[in-house]
Amino acid sequence: METSTDRIAEPWGSRSAYGPGQPWPVRVDAHFAPGVRPADVERWVPSASLLHSNGDAMEIAVLSGRIVGVRGRAVDRVNRGRLGPKDLFGWQANASPDRLTRPLVREGGRLVECDWPTAMGRVASRSQQLLTERGPGSVGFYTSGQLFLEEYYTLTVLARAGIGTHHLDGNTRLCTATAGEALKETFGTDGQPGSYTDIDHADTLALFGHNVAETQTVLWMRILDRLEGPQPPRLICVDPRPTPVARRATVHLPLRGGTNVALLNALLHEILRTGRIDRDYLAAHTVGFEGLQAQVAACTPQWAAGICDVPARLICEAAEILGSAERLVSTVLQGVYQSHQATAAAVQVNNLHLVRGMLGRPGAGVLQMNGQPTAQNTRECGANGDLPGFRNWQNEEHIADLARVWNVTPDRIPHDKPPTPAMEMFRYAEQGSIRMLWISGTNPAVSLPELHRIRSLLAQDRLFVVVQDLYLTETAQLADVVLPAATWGEKTGTFTNADRTVHLSEKAVDPPGQARPDLDIFLDYAARMDFRDKAGAPLVAWHDAPSAFEAWQRCSAGRPCDYTGLSYDRLRETGGIQWPCNDQAPHGTERLYTDGITWADPDLCESYGKDLETGAPADSAAYRSLNPQGKAVIRSAAYLPPPEDTSPDFPLQLNTGRTLYHFHTRTKTGRTPQLDAAAPDVWAELSAAEAAAHALGEGDLIEVTTPRGALRARLRITAMRDGMVFVPFHYGYWDTPDGPPPEGAGRAANETTPTDWDPASQQPLFKTGAARISLVTRSDGTPAPAPTITASAPASPGSLPPTTGGVEAYATYDG
Ligand SMILES: Nc1nc2c(c(=O)[nH]1)N[C@H]1C(S)=C(S)[C@@H](COP(=O)(O)OP(=O)(O)OC[C@H]3O[C@@H](n4cnc5c(=O)[nH]c(N)nc54)[C@H](O)[C@@H]3O)O[C@H]1N2
Ligand SMILES: Nc1nc2c(c(=O)[nH]1)N[C@H]1C(S)=C(S)[C@@H](COP(=O)(O)OP(=O)(O)OC[C@H]3O[C@@H](n4cnc5c(=O)[nH]c(N)nc54)[C@H](O)[C@@H]3O)O[C@H]1N2
Ligand SMILES: [Mo]
């Protein structure tokens, strides 16, 4: 039956309850432009969501050459037809009148319009000049988790074997570097062990620093539908904030920020103490258990309670649930990844599953989540710094194999030292060894820590900055050349979600003006640079998305992320398919490690592992002696306090993150009326006790200050733990009337965050810092511009007018 509701007010829509082992019922969600009916639609074009990592399959509705709506794909394994608010409404941003339609170059200090040959000519000639004068180390590429697979692969080939630089990384460094690193540390290679279908079978779900209700709304619908059905799973939520997940949890552990390792060590301590371990699994498939035993021996719940500031009783309850689970699914995301012991904590979740033998069967799986829609492809294609196909940069045979695929000599592939992580690239640009930085599909002038530093280093004269984007973002405003890109719906390619499901996204409409697909831009550059292989043929020998996909299939052959069994035709027809997909697994692979650990062998693994405390990489000999038979490695870690702890000057912990209605720096969701209206400006969250201690009330304008800088935001009083202030990081200044903030009075969370990172994954610490707050002006009675349905719900429910979307936000669902 088709019904229609306000999907801003009801982001998760209606329930379709189901029981363990049953298939998740279909429900098809749709939204169209005013006046358009489904029957009017001329063409439906297959695609998937691009505003989070869930990979919800959809079709784009086209009428008279315009996108006029979207609907979910009922056949797809990921969403069974459902869509979240960002996907129902976000497509409207494609047609925003302020899209970039022509390239821009900086002339006399100003950005002026030009044609493509002029813009690309400047980029190529500056590259040539730098290669001659300073060598490949003077050129850096900082890309995204939001382009398509074909684009990343092309960029990797031209940056590595073309330019020959170490400096290629993605904003995935800020996002899922820890997911990749944690999987490498434990299983020897990247690749998600679990599957979303594990939710259908689980008796226990444990979410570590993952506000899935707001950040993967459709996965939360799946969980809600299990929670409403027979034999619902037990739910553990580890998050300092009262997220929608916390509100539904069997046990909520609202821990002090940055204390995940202490908590996890205590949970492992209890599980070991009560003997809930799978000795056969440990013996057959792991090394390192004794180290873990020793490490957690003294980590009692009472000990952790003192560090995490949660009652020991709650830790014991959570351990009891984890210890008695028979089908356990754990997920991990930014509350773990963006803290100082990110990798150390994330691998303890892997350890929990190894110790309990909870892997490789229905309902037993780890999801080291991704955040961005195509972050998995950034990693597997090597645009995150690692080598394509999860090859090991320290293994000469892997280098030789890649050199064979690219038909170059092995010395053309830089591998004498580790690839440069993004934070180091920005430091090299600051210090002057990187002289050209090509930024594609990311907005670092809002998303990197310590923004005054980022602004000033991007504005340097000696640094040539190329920005490839859809809009004149805060970053593009600092560029020397701006390249207008086509986006989702305007170009064709594939991308892979957090559970290895590959989707095809096809071109539905033409891009505006002269905007071009990122792939065409990279191919144009490769042609201008005239990169050659060792036979003198073009290094980048493909010319469009299908031929780029085929080139990638050859590169992925025989690797963990094998794409050789996929094709655009198959993906178009069936919807998403999970890799590896090849002759042995023609229908794709639901879960990894169903039959033991497959890629940790010293000759096969992507990484020899790192010291979790220092980040120092191990070498082949060390790994061989640790793990000669290629089992899963149990790596233990001692808890360390956060590097920037609270002090009398900065008494509050600083936490930053997301809200349901916005995506990142809001370049798309801020241009979508329904989403913009739901959360139009920044706010800051405090507990009622903390607000009272500071004599502050709802809606007061406050200043949040750290040693780096300050921001101003309206106060929302929530049921959050005491001693913490939370600020969403979505709000830059492109849509503020006054442009860039005078230093010290911005509204971006990253004015205040520290330049510091986890040693093993090199992911920045957006959730670990210390701050103080002060009153700027009292509220006139207006509440903070924060949604009321989400983690920012008011402490006293119903005390404020609820967030609604009105008629504009009505969407239908069928099912
Ligand atoms: N609506 C929406 N959805 C998105 C995105 C978006 O911008 N908006 N972005 C996508 C991307 S790229 C990503 S990476 C994901 C991120 O998805 P999530 O990781 O779910 O989102 P965050 O809000 O960054 O952080 C999650 C939670 O971590 C908690 N946290 C903070 N410190 C700690 C800690 O020390 N320990 C623990 N256990 N928890 C802590 C925060 O309170 C927060 O509720 O979302 C994806 N989906
Ligand atoms: N304080 C704080 N900071 C954070 C985080 C946090 O939790 N707290 N989270 C971090 C995380 S997990 C992430 S993922 C980052 C996200 O940070 P960013 O990547 O900087 O955020 P976006 O706004 O998604 O930027 C993507 C840019 O790509 C453009 N774009 C979209 N589609 C296309 C396309 O097809 N082609 C091209 N060329 N451009 C396109 C968009 O217009 C936008 O400008 O922020 C990080 N920063
Ligand atoms: Mo992310």
Image: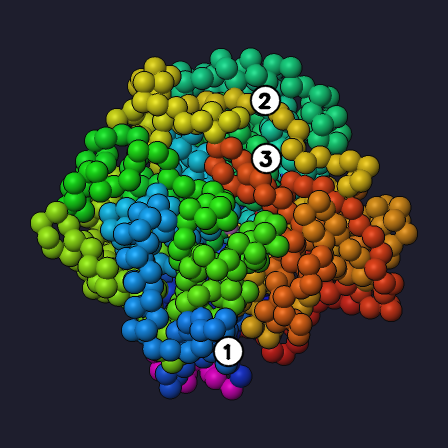
**Residue 247 image point, x, y percent:** 69, 47
Q: Tell me which numbered mark, 2 or 3, is placed earlier along the sequence.
A: 3
In the picture of the structure, the residue carrying the numbered disc 3 is: 340
Please tell me how crowded label 1 is: few (under 14), some (14-19), or many (20+) other residues with Cα within 10 Å.
few
Q: Residue at x 68, y 47 (%)?
A: 708
Whether label 3 touches label 1, CB < 8 Å: no
Marks 1 and 2 sit apart, C-alpha to C-alpha, by 51 Å
Q: Does the segment drawn in magenta span residue 737?
A: no
Residue 753 lies left or right of residue 382; in this view the side is right
Chain part drawn in magenta: 35-45
The image shows residue 179 at horizontal and vertical percentages of: 46, 40
Q: Give the CA separation, mark 3 to mark 1.
A: 39 Å
- In percent of the image, x 50 and y 78: which residue is there? 98
Location of residue 477 with respect to 689 vertically, above or below: below
Instruction: Tell me which numbered mark, 1 or 2, is placed earlier along the sequence.
Output: 1
Q: Amino acid at mark 2?
A: Ala
Look at the numbered discs 2 and 3 and tell me whether their residues touch, using CB distance below 8 Å.
no
Q: In the image, is 21 to the left or to the right of 492?
A: right
Give residue 109's position: percent from left, percent from top: 50, 71
Is disc 3 surrounded by few (<14), some (14 to 19) or many (20+) residues within 10 Å? many
Q: Is residue 800 above or below residue 2?
A: above
